[in-house]
Amino acid sequence: MDQTRRSLIKAAAGTALLSAVPGGSLLAQDKSPIKVGVLHSLSGTMAISETSLKDVALMTFDQINAKGGILGRKIEPIVVDPASNWPLFAEKARQLLTQDKVAATFGCWTSVSRKSVLPVYEELNGLLFYPVQYEGEEMSKNVFYTGAAPNQQAIPATEYLMSPEGGGAKRFFLLGTDYVYPRTTNKILRAFLKSKGVKETDIEEIYTPFGHSDYQTIVANIKKYSTGGKTCVISTINGDSNVPFYKELGNAGLKATDVPVVAFSVGEEELRGIDTKPLVGHLAAWNYFMSLKNPQNTAFIKEWLAYVKAKNLTGGDKRVTNDPMEATYVGIHMWKQAVEKAKSADVAAVRKAMYGQKYAAPCGFELTMNDNHHLSKPVFIGEIKADGQFNIVWKTKGPIRAQPWSQYIDGNQGKPDKVAA
Amino acid sequence: MNATALPLEVAATSIAHEPRARLFSPAGWAAIGVALLVFGVVVPLLALAVPEGNALHLTSYALTLSGKILCYALCAVALDLVWGYCGILSLGHGLFFALGGYAMGMYLMRSIGLDGVYHMDLPDFMVFLDWKTLPWYWKGTHSFAYSALLVVLVPGLLAFVFGYFAFRSRIKGVYLSIITQALTYAAMLLFFRNDTGFGGNNGFTDFKRILGFSIHAPGTRVVLFALSGFALVGALVLCRFIVTSRLGRVVTAIRDAESRVMFCGYDPKAYKLFVWTLSAVLCGIAGALYVPQVGIINPSEMAPTNSIEMVVWVATGGRGTLFGPIVGAGVVNLAKSYFTVAAPEYWLFFLGLIFVLVTIFLPQGIVGLLRRRKQG
Amino acid sequence: MGSGLDWNSYPVEAGSAAKFAPHPRAIVRAGTAHPMIMRILVLLLALLAASLSPASQALTPESLKPFAGDEASEKLTAIDALIAAPDARVAAVLAAIRDDRLAYTDDTHFYVGETGAYVDAVSGAAATPKADDLKPVEINNRIRAKLNAALAAMDLLSPDRAVRAKAVADLEKASDPALVALVDSALATEQDPALKATLQVVRAAFALKTSDREQKLAALVALGASESPQTRQLLLPFVEKTKEGGFVEADAELRGAAEASLKSIDQRQQKGELLGSLFTGISLGSILLLVALGLAITYGLMGVINMAHGEFLMIGAYATYVVQGWFRAHWPGAESWYLAAAIPVAFLVTAAVGAVLERTVIRFLYGRPLETLLATFGISLLLIQLTRTIFGAQNVEVANPAWMSGGIQILPNLILPWNRLYIIAFSAIVVAGVWAILNLTRLGLYVRAVTQNRAMAGCVGVKTPRVDMLAFALGAGIAGLGGVALSQIGNVGPDLGQSYIIDSFMVVVLGGVGQLAGTIVGSLSLGIVSKFLEPYAGAVLAKIMVLVFIILFIQRRPQGMFALKGRSADA
């Protein structure tokens, strides 16, 4: 009897307390799921790269939901397929924001897709997390950029190649696919090289169209160019076309010790589809490699492979992790932390809570989201190994702050390094 | 293909005396009237006057999607004119659509003025390519009138020149289709080059205003939508007028038996060229209306697969009917929007199946199916 | 430049040998004795001495210890130490490191070899380390370059001519006066005339650095005979202009000799480039031939342009991938020969798919070529998505077998890759086979008959539906073979076919149908013209020019170059 009364009093007191706390009643009410959008191409030319990002995003949502969700609410992902079609990206983005009313979107890969959805996000005040390395020259208050800006990838790689450790290159062959990322990166690199005293005649800039597969003439040109001095190739060739380029290099007998090639769009995923024997020794620069050895990365890879197995994804245990996947993972966790800090999924509140967010990422460092909407990330240079993984040959001491407005482009001087409130 | 052709001998002698076929049945005119009313009155009301949150409110998403489909429908009508009525299967009409879009895009890029990322008078992509002045082919595009002229002239001129040489050499059938593919592919490669001066792979984007009005304002959206609708109706009436005229009879005859038309004394070149050029101009106009609604134009609009998708709209709806392609464009694009959300991995299966099934089992398309049902 | 950032403050990993502060010397002055080259010189003299004393002094577990660590600088020092007292065992270990065949279990136990056949690195005795504990020794480009030069120096006195030839070729890249003594001693003992000539050129390159004017002049003249592209690098400083417009090299005679030598070298280079363009053109042409041949046969026969043709290429490439997988799983020893098995498999699989396609879809659209075009486009979408669903959207790896990698060096600036040579030969064989089928078999007879006049052939008793199916299957099978070839030179992914379909159309349209000659001439001319335009106009403009050329060509001659059918009104 006494015990029942005691428990009744306890219960009554507890309910009174709960209802007395102002947020308490809200928390008790709002258990509805938080909707998030996943905007990656699952068909078309970009499906090769973007399908893995969708998979890792879903894996992260599952992981967070298994631990109870955010603020007690489960995450409900809405996956749409813009089919590598740029106007369709804008349409899907609008749909996610107006019909599904998502709290945040994780998506895009190419700069065109991002530029196509940017006006939509700015008009409807949405939040986009963009995980791919890109050319900079953008700083929108509706986008958080978790990929590298040129000063976190291209410049360190070039410095490495100029150093004795990297081969002491004197001539630079800038080879890229003809679109904005290589053009801007090469412009920045040209100005950077000039500032280091490299002559105009020691820099060569060549562009090939998308899907270009016959590199015989270009490789012959590289060979000829290299007779003028120790040459390195800085390749901003778009992912797929790297394969025929490397094959041609290998067949022409140009080894990495003669003419090292550093690529910015070649990661573990692209190497999966190549025979890597002729590529041993060529380089890539990223902010994350699967072969990094640290506890966060081990856990990340383990979880990823378990997810692949559980969902029976194609590729099985040959699936790999790469930089954009890690950036997606970090972005989602940072967003989760921001929502918890702001106690709401409202865009303005989350944005403010994002500044200064830190996360112990699989790259082994603690990354910070700065008020310029970009992450401070470390830089790694890796050499391709015969098994398709990378051997890390150099890394920065710690994370570097991104510089979206490169000082090497006219008109950028004087631009503030933070987003206007 | 030979659904309604009269025996040619009868046609040739009686063309001079036969009364013009009526443009539309009373039901057809009524449908057009309703459509005009919807475009001009109902939709603006639903989009602007009805408050948000109300079930009847037309979201900006639905508005832009519908506007896009209307532009596609206009293209489909243009393609039907040239394929359904003249027998020229063009697999490169997307080129004219894109050219009209680019012409409008040039005007929109100039209208950004100093509000671009670099706050300079030149479009952003020229700034980072280190160009100091506008190339000559950009001069004058700050004026809306001139750009509107370009929208009509550029696709029209290209079509005229290409058609003149092609029809003069009597290239037809599959060879012509392949050549139109090559044309649009070559143009796509050209526009993908950043050095060509049209923004390369990024194309034109980040538009701010059109004719002084903000491009994101709901009012502007509604006006663009209404204009697309009116253009579609106008094109429908125009094409119907042409195909029911004397010229139209000859064109249909060319589709059915070109050699016989030649032997009867007509020169098919001029007829084909006229229809072909008109169709290109209509596509250009569709492209010009499409770009401000979608907010971006880039060379992948010229991709060969885009043009082939246009053909499937016409085939699905029913070619040779003018109204069918509108239905086809609507059905296929709505299905696309639905499938890429509901079952993204299966969208291409569905599209492929439509192609196959429609060509084998539904040669007359949906409209033909409905007609058969009505008759039988 | 007015950069707002101080690049010298770039954070660098403490203790790393990679000094990232921009080094003060922008140009390595020629003539500075590179410390590494000095050591190689010492090595060689030591080698001569060591050949008298067999015991290995340098190779101890202690000397190999740094290779178990992460520090590249320590590994470089360890290599220097090993080179100082070289012998056969040291050479073996160094070669193993370079080839990724050195592994360790801890910092005192090192093993050389592959799984199942390990020997202890120090003693050379057979050993069986636990596979789980073995970690590979990792190196970077700088270490690799050092190892190459060291091993090359050791090879210079080898009794095997091929080894010496390679060593001389490697030495050509390192033109350092400290190696003069080395080269002189090799010249003294070298008997082979070709190698001797190359060594003399190498010697002349070194002589350029001396201050003796006569020697320099003689060297400049001698270098005109050099076949090596690296020689240009050496001659260029003699004709370099200063900022004011004068010449860096004051002596006019030396300058004249350098110019004359440069000219003769350039002429030889040009010859190499011309041959190179021709070869790449033929190679591209052979690929276009394989890709377009099947299409030409089906179009000539049935007037059907098959938009799914690109997908037949893709199916052939994926069949190759699957066969490679079988070989890897069941006969790993014979893996290099998977291609031989892939050829018939790809042909049969694609032919079967083609036959099914013809029976189920194309047959219903007989006489309606435009509809067939559309229906086959739908089929192509289905096939692409099916492949994506089964194999995944990512590219899959198809490795070149060992006998297809690398190339054969014709001229110093011309290497013909083996894979392209094999593909040219392969396409020639395929064309010969198709010719044989078309002209020597019954089926071929029927195919030719139906192509020329379908109605008449039917009247005479040819079973046209069956001929259609078999010819379509044949065309598809040839496309499958094209896919096998494509898998060796490019990506294998679901979109493989899309990049070749326009090119196949162009070949068919240009070459005309009904005759094999049309396809052959069309593809070869397209390939060669594209490749000759490319150095001048760039890849994109070259392609556009070729397309425009074809469009214009068709205006003049709509039936293509070699046409069987006349320009009949109903053609």
Image: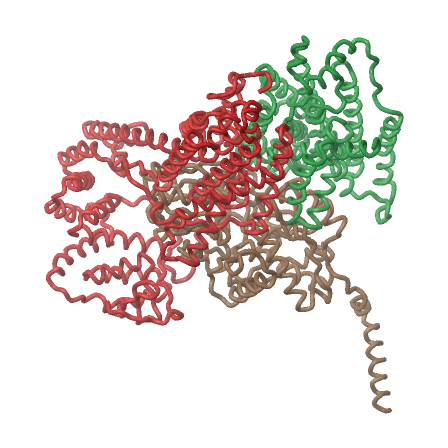
- Quarter the C terminus of chain C occupies: top right
The green one among the chains is B
Q: Is residue C541 left or right of residue C207?
A: right
Q: Is residue B163 above or below residue A137?
A: above
Q: Nearer the viewer, residue B302 or B258?
A: B258
Q: Kindly tell me whether residue A388 is visible in this rendering.
A: yes
Q: Is residue A165 above or below residue C124?
A: above
Q: Position of residue B195 (x, y in %)?
A: 52, 31
The red one among the chains is C
Q: Is residue C199 left or right of residue C329?
A: left
Q: Position of residue B217 (x, y in %)?
A: 77, 38
Q: Nearer the viewer, residue B216 or A399?
A: B216
Quadrant of residue C14 in the image?
bottom left
Q: Residue furthest bottom?
A: A2
Q: For chain A, give the colour.
A: brown
Quadrant of residue B233 in the image?
top right
Q: Position of residue A167 (x, y in %)?
A: 35, 49
Quadrant of residue C243 in the image?
top left
Q: Nearer the viewer, residue C204 or A316?
A: A316
